[in-house]
Image: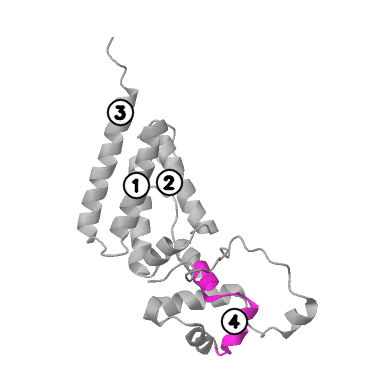
Amino acid sequence: MVTAADPGEIRTSVWLAAGPAAPARRRSEAPSGLDRDRITAASVRLLDAGGLARFSMRRLAAGLGVTAMSLYWYVDTKQDLLELALDRALGELRPPAAVAEGTAEGTAEGGGGAGWPGQLQTLARGYRRVVTDHPWVAPLAAAFPNIGPHARAFDAALQRLLDATGLVDAARTGAHLAVSQFLHGCGGTVRRAPEGDFCLALDVLIAGIEVKAGARRVPARP
């Protein structure tokens, strides 16, 4: 199990550690042909091929044809690199656009159907596809703060879709918690649900949110 930091270690997320630029002399000494983007892409390929257990800076460097120390010109730690790889994988998601608040009708580019229910299905199934294609994503998402740009774009899309339900206060919070727990549970750090079970459970979850949202719009009897 990968952890965000070793016991007793205080670690700052790579997305928050904006260190000073390297001096010109050090930049000139950096290995040619390497950059952080290329190293991150190679990390994703290595993780796909061997999983977290076989991932190491030495194997990564060998695949790039450089020394392991060369990688540390671009990242401070292996954990930093795993954070970068996680967000790169999440970049495969194409979050749908939002719909009008309180409606389940209308279409939007990239949506999987009319209104927020179809778009929420698209978003959830897209997340499952990412964790299926990259089995190492789920444990890393549980271990790290997961605040990279693609992770934040995913959460922003989810927030917009939940806004479109018209739910507020505790109901809105509960819907967000239910969807988040469902995705991380069925996407699964322990056992990923089969696709048919996942889609059925997702339908039930969305139907429940629709009922809750519909009840909010029905005027109370005098």
Q: Is residue 165 visible?
A: no
Q: How crowded is the residue under tag 2: few (<14 C-alpha within 10 Å), some, or many (20+)? A: many
Q: Which residue is mark 3?
A: 214
**Residue on which the image places disc 4:** 71
Image marks 2 and 1: residues in contact by CB distance under 8 Å = yes
Residue at the spot of label 2:
158
Q: Which residues are magenta?
A: 65-84
Report whether 40 appears left or right of 202: right
SS class of the residue under badge 1?
A: helix
Q: Is residue 48 above or below residue 84?
A: below
Report x, y in % for residue 192. 26, 63
Alpha carbon separation for disc pair 3 and 2: 19 Å
Q: Earlier in the sequence, mark 3 or mark 4?
A: 4
Q: Is residue 190 above or below residue 177?
A: below
Q: Residue furthest top?
A: 222
Quadrant in the picture for residue 48: bottom left
The residue drawn where x is 34% and y is 56% is 184
* Image spot of residue 96 (x, y percent): 43, 48
Image quadrant for the N terminus? bottom left
Amino acid type at mark 3: Gly
The image position of residue 42, as x and y in percent, is 50, 78
For the question of whether residue 216 can be seen, the reply is yes
**Residues packed near mark 4 inside 10 Å, few (<14), some (14 to 19) or many (20 plus):** many
The amino acid at mark 1 is: Val
Q: Judging from the image, what secondary structure is the residue with disc 2 in?
A: helix
Which residue ends up furthest to the right in the rendered image? Answer: 24
Dominant secondary structure of the magenta stretch?
Answer: helix
- The CA distance from mark 2 to mark 1 is 9 Å
Compare residues 55 and 117 and report the one nearer the observer: 55
Amino acid carrying label 2: it is Leu
